[in-house]
Amino acid sequence: MRDAWNLGRLEMGKPTRVVLVLMLAGLFCSNAYPRQDPVDPQSPLNVSMIALIGNPRQFQGKRIRVIGYVDIEFENEALYPHKEDFQDGISMNAIALRLSETQRQRYKHLTQGLVIVEGVFYANGPETGEYSGAIGKITRFDRWQTGTD
């Protein structure tokens, strides 16, 4: 038994360990990158709020799809990663929503809940003093259904 263990250790040399570590790192990191539907390259990128806030320039001008906690008030429409960020007023952890008056009225009932939003992301604009970017040209704005709803 001891010889089998030593043989196994000998086969897993330093280069093999490095490859294994790199493969595992790639597996864990793959969820951090935006995903696009391979069948429809025109579909929005699936992006996390964390990715948008952490690297907004990467998504400048791109069509995105994101899930977050929404607050819709007059002149203060934003998407937050968590309800607590909204409650604590951490606007730099939020993305502004460029809603028309019609959209504001249409989506008002979704306020203070989880939503899925599709639109174009803007890393620069008048909102960036208070928020970490904005989503405009919104084409989808729906309640996000979780497994606990």
Image (cartoon, rainbow, N blue to C red):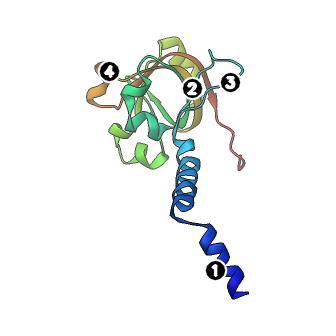
Which sits earlier in the primary sequence, circle 2 or circle 4?
2
**Which amino acid type is shown beneath numbered disc 4?**
Asn
Instruction: Tell me if label 3 and label 1 are in contact, CB under 8 Å.
Output: no
Residue, disc 1: 6
The residues tagged by marks 2 and 1 sit, at their Cα atoms, a distance apart of 48 Å
The tag earlier along the polypeptide, 4 or 3, is: 3
Foreground mark, 2 or 1? Answer: 1
Residue bearing mark 3: 38
* Left or right: where 104 falls relative to 129: right
Q: Position of residue 62 (x, y in %)?
A: 48, 19
Question: Of the numbered discs in the image, which one, if any, rests on residue 45?
Answer: 2
Say which mark, if any, is on residue 142.
Answer: none
Q: Say if 18 sits above or below 6 in the image.
A: above
Instruction: Give how far across and how far down residue 39 sits, in percent.
Output: 72, 20
Q: Are marks 1 and 4 in contact (CB under 8 Å)?
A: no
Q: CA distance from mark 4 to mark 3?
A: 28 Å
Question: What residue is pinned by disc 4?
Answer: 124
